[in-house]
Amino acid sequence: MSLNNTPSGDRIHIGFFGRRNAGKSSVVNAVTGQDLAVVSDYKGTTTDPVSKAMELLPLGPVMIIDTPGFDDEGELGQLRVKKTRQVLNKTDIAVLVVDASEGLKECDHQLIELFKAKDISYIVVYNKSDLLESIPADTENSIYVSALRGEKIFELKERIAKLKQTQTDKRIIADKLQPNDFVVLVVPIDSAAPKGRLILPQQQTIRDILDANAVSIVVKETELSETLASLGKKPAMVITDSQVFKTVAPLVPADIPLTSFSILMARYKGLIDAAVPGAAAVEKLKDGDTVLIAEGCTHHRQCDDIGSVKIPNWLKKYTGKNITIKTCSGPEFPDDLTPYAMVIHCGGCMLNEREVRYRTKCAVDQNVPITNYGTLIAYLNGILKRSVELFPELCEKL
């Protein structure tokens, strides 16, 4: 996968924060070498977060996010500040831009405290250093630059790159495979399937299998039995779209591990430890309870949409209870989850790991059970234990 094609959820998210007119957008443009953000002397030019996927050397594929001023005022201003706070939940590296001629203000200190509270690596960038008679020395977590003159922008990029926290080499499924293993992927093609392509979790799983020097065999559920019978070699596992778990499970011999793309994404993004025990919360649902179904992206909902149609129907059929379903999508994830009896999240393929872990922690801290689509569907079909047998540590949570 080329850097240009790296999914947004796998990019390092770099957020630029600060007061209005501190020069955030100018610094963003200088760092990216593009006119990514509108620049003006008028306060509050950036009214909504602006995101751009790009390559930023020496980091590689990143998501640059320019945010509204954190000191914005009025009713609309407070809505913009709220959006800036939401950006923090997915920020891997924070860049606090300060007007060097004015220095740190109260709202800058508030942002620094938020960075620390959320364990976000950050650097303070004193912009407009060209207005100073003498430029102070840089410190371990600060640097003086001039976006206008392009001064020390290269050094700033080097400093940002050093803030990248060392991460383990996370894999979707490759860590469970040996070279030349056969992996059968079950991909239903129905009205909900995107025309002419596979959805992102399927693409990423195939790539991860190839990186393990294993063999991926992609079939529809209607061809699964014949494919398994004709392979001549027992596959290492079968990975299916969760929506056809009920159809696929009886077709896969018990000695062949079975899981789903959604369960693998929950593991990859850091949700799975809470999702496995969280699925059992359906047993405690009662009349009048409200369930939140959350999706990480926004998309056109179809008549048989999984989040707004299929899962609510399956839940009500399984429990026999009069349950209220609420939905949210994109960045609009509620801070207060206490009104909900449980949260059911999508696989999170369009979110980065930090945001998925943030959402999971919100639920756990508020004692609200959280699970995800694939884990719940496996539970409703009585095959959750089988679906996570590849991961013994998860079986212990059942």
Image (tube, grey):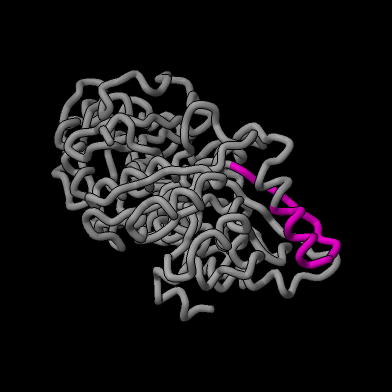
Residue 289 percent coordinates (x, y)? 79, 65
Residue 10 percent coordinates (x, y)? 35, 44
Location of residue 81 by image quarter: top right
Of all residues, the one furthest to the bottom in this rendering is 396
Q: Is residue 284 above or below residue 362?
A: below
- The quadrant of the image that shows the N terminus is top left
Can residue 345 be seen by looking at this rendering?
no
Write down the region rendered in magenta.
311-329
Residue depicted at 39% across the width and 54% down the height = 115
Magenta span includes 232: no
Magenta span includes 314: yes
Residue depicted at 19% across the width and 34% down the height = 57
Q: Nearer the viewer, residue 89 or 174?
A: 174
Residue 24 percent coordinates (x, y)? 37, 32
Q: Across the whole image, how many numbered discs are drawn on residues?
A: 0
Residue 6 percent coordinates (x, y)? 33, 36
Left or right of 173? Residue 81 is right
Residue depicted at 63% across the width and 53% down the height = 334
Left or right of 239? Residue 249 is right
Residue depicted at 62% across the width and 51% down the height = 294
Q: Is residue 95 above or below residue 325?
A: above
Q: Nearer the viewer, residue 283 or 186?
A: 186
Left or right of 59? Residue 306 is right
Q: Is residue 304 above or below residue 391?
A: above
Can residue 300 be seen by looking at this rendering?
yes
